[in-house]
Amino acid sequence: MTPFGISEAAVGAILAQPEQSHVIAIEGIGTNQPLGMFAGRAKGDRSGHVILVIGLISGDQLQVVMAFKIPPQIADREGTLEPPLRMLEGLANLCGVPVVLAEHIAKFITSERIPVPAGTTIQGPFFVNPANSRLMTMQLVRPVIAAGQAYADCALCFAIEIEAYERVLGLRSPPPQPDPATHQIALIVDDAAKQTMMLSGVSAQRAIQTVRQRHSSMLILSDKPMLNSIRWFEDGDIVFVSALVTKSRPEGSGIWIDEVRAAIVLSLRPNLPGGVLDRNTEMAQLLPVIARSFGRKVLCHPAFGFSSLYTGPWDGQMPRYDWAAGDETLLFSGSFDNRSKTCSWVWAFSPDAYRRWRQSLRIS
């Protein structure tokens, strides 16, 4: 608590007179003690931050396990404090890393029963952290089998990246950013991407604009970093580019990208076969929709079964694909780390599935 500027006295004051509180019942996990959340404004603090205290309840005692300063833009809604669970969700979306549980990917999971694919071992959550950043995690998950179906029962799960949190609090300087007036990412398009561009009608100019002026993106750090970018254009077109980072420079815990080689370039619409693309949604939620729409399931580790989009342990082998009738070729996208034997955001793009969808748009 102290490194983040939260004193024991401030925590005690919040617990004595909380402005908001919430309790999560926990069954079959650890000691079965309920998890309590208590929030309030610290006296004399002019920053506007709200203190959120989380702990295990035992009778009239609370064992504090975490305490956060919540920025006012997350905690305060027109003078009224948000519920503690919503504050925590806002902080996880701002400073957290994606959490993978079965085939579910999100930065914040609570009170969800998530189906586990048949033949897959029920595992705990996997945190997408290729940069090996320091994390504060909560993972209250238990395996459940009901009516022959395996589930992961998640009471609460998230992972806050400490450096990102410190930057939000102003305790750490933001990483330097390249000047957009002088730094432009160069884009190379490989042969496979050229084929999808011809099919979808995406021009080279739009592909470059998507990479340079992306509305949402995801940089996957590993031995071979990847950049997924998406941009909404004024005429209603949505362009998605998945590219391998071919030239970059290290900067702190991240990198500055100088050049990428596009492998997949798609023209999309808001309503896809696998779900809806929302401009206000992060890439971590957009990529699963694209993968479900035009991908084939992949297997990267025998203990985890086939998945439309996979992040987790890797057996070191080439991914196995679930081919479907009519597939002439598949293009895989994702990142593999030989050191940790993990992989991130792996999916198999089917040009034939995409072609059939494009044809259906013309027919309708």
Image (tube, rainbow, N blue to C red):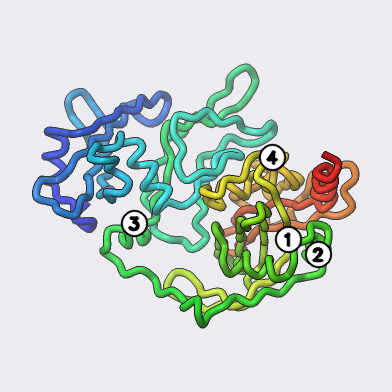
Residue 198 location in percent, x, y? 83, 62
Secondary structure beneath label 3: helix
Q: Which residue is mark 3?
A: 165
Q: Amino acid at mark 4?
A: Gly
Q: Do the residues bearing badges 2 and 1 touch, measured as CB atoms within 8 Å?
A: yes
Q: Nearer the viewer, residue 82 or 9?
A: 82
Circle 1 residues within 10 Å: few <14, some 14–19, many ≥20: many
- Mark 1 or mark 4: name the one nearer the start of the chain: 1
Q: Amino acid at mark 2?
A: Ala
Alpha-carbon span between mark 3 and mark 1: 33 Å
Q: Amino acid at mark 3?
A: Tyr
Per the rendering, the mark at residue 192 is 2
User: In the figure, residue 271 lies in which quadrant?
Assistant: top right
Residue 56 location in percent, x, y? 27, 33
Q: Which residue is mark 1?
A: 264
- At 63% from the left and 45% from the top, the residue drawn is 288
Residue 275 location in percent, x, y? 65, 39
Q: Do the residues bearing badges 4 and 3 touch, measured as CB atoms within 8 Å?
A: no
- 120 lies above or below 217: above
Q: Amino acid at mark 1?
A: Ile
- 329 lies above or below 64: below
Q: Nearer the viewer, residue 49 or 339?
A: 49
Alpha-carbon span between mark 2 and mark 1: 7 Å
Q: Which residue is mark 4?
A: 274
Residue 124 location in percent, x, y? 51, 40
- Mark 3 or mark 2: name the one nearer the start of the chain: 3
Secondary structure beneath label 4: loop
